[in-house]
């Protein structure tokens, strides 16, 4: 048995589902020894009830069970929380069931009998992967919030402000600049920035307000 479980994986909650009491007790004991918080369910029906009651970091479920099988447990787990990892165990592996499990979002598909050490390694890797996904979601949310705040700030400015990429294409234009041109942001985004500036100069020169072009500022 491995004792090298990552600290980030200890105390994670695992729902263990199998209709064979011996396997349930054996795997449960091994996982608890690795400091996982294990809840056992001896049927698919019981597993669905537990999934609807509380969150689990990982579900380890047998595929072939009467009434509600492992694929139904997998679907419910992912429907309730897509960040929950799911490992499918089966003693009757075939290509069709493997494809179905992976299509429904299974993270790992293992054939029984499976050595406890191999399962524990797969569990650790799965939890680490889910943890990285969660961190990425948080980072993306922070970036999105930061971009939203920046956009609100730029749109509140009285001066016309625009941004361009490395190819000189317009990537952002605030409300003031859009109003100066008389076009919506959707019509301007993607245009060459030199063409944008020429349009402004022509517009204000024609109307005898050439000085007004000085109010347009680039973010770059």
Image (spheres, rainbow, N blue to C red):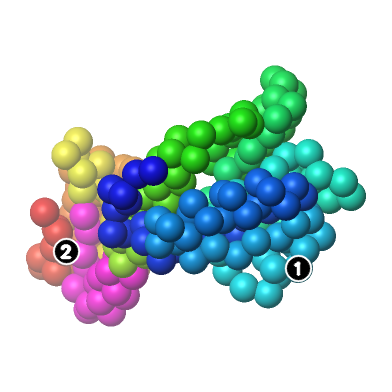
Task: Tell me if mark 2 has few (under 14), some (14-19) or many (20+) residues whose alpha carbon lies within 10 angstroms of its own.
Answer: some
On the image, the x and y values in percent for residue 12 come to: 44, 63
State which quarter of the image contains the N terminus.
Answer: top left
Mark carried by residue 36: none
On the image, the x and y values in percent for residue 215 come to: 14, 69
Question: Residue beneath label 1, please?
Answer: 49
Q: How many numbered circles does the render carry?
A: 2
State which quarter of the image contains the C terminus.
Answer: bottom left
Q: Quadrant of residue 178?
A: bottom left
Residue at x-position 40% and y-position 56%:
34
Determine the secondary structure under disc 2. strand
Relative height, residue 68 to residue 168 (above, below) = below
Residue at x-position 28% and y-position 69%:
146
Residue bounds of the magenta highlight: 145-163
> In the shown orientation, is residue 31 left or right of residue 170?
right
> In the shown orientation, is residue 81 left or right of residue 31?
right
On the image, the x and y values in percent for residue 182 come to: 37, 62
Q: Is residue 147 magenta?
A: yes
Relative height, residue 209 to residue 126 (above, below) = below
Residue at x-position 77% and y-position 63%:
46
Mark carried by residue 216: 2
């Amino acid at each position: 048995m491995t004792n090298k479980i990552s600290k980030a994986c200890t105390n994670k909650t695992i729902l263990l589902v199998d209709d064979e009491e011996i396997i349930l007790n054996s795997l449960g004991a091994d996982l608890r020894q690795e400091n996982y918080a294990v809840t056992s369910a001896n049927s698919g029906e019981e597993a669905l009830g537990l999934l609807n009651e509380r969150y689990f970091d990982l579900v380890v479920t047998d595929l072939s069970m009467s009434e509600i099988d492992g694929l139904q447990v997998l679907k419910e787990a992912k429907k309730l929380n897509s960040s929950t990892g799911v490992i499918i165990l089966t003693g009757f592996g075939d290509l069709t069931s493997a494809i179905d499990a992976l299509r429904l979002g299974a993270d790992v598909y293992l054939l029984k009998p499976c050595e406890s050490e191999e399962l524990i390694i797969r569990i650790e890797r799965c939890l680490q992967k889910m943890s990285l996904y969660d961190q990425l979601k948080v980072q993306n949310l922070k970036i999105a919030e930061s971009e939203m705040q920046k956009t609100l700030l730029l749109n509140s400015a009285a001066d016309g402000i625009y941004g361009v990429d490395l190819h000189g294409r317009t990537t952002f234009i605030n409300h003031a600049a859009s109003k100066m041109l008389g076009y919506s942001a959707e019509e301007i985004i993607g245009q060459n920035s030199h063409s944008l500036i020429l349009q402004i100069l022509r517009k204000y020169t024609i109307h005898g307000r050439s000085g007004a072009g000085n109010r347009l500022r680039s973010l770059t």
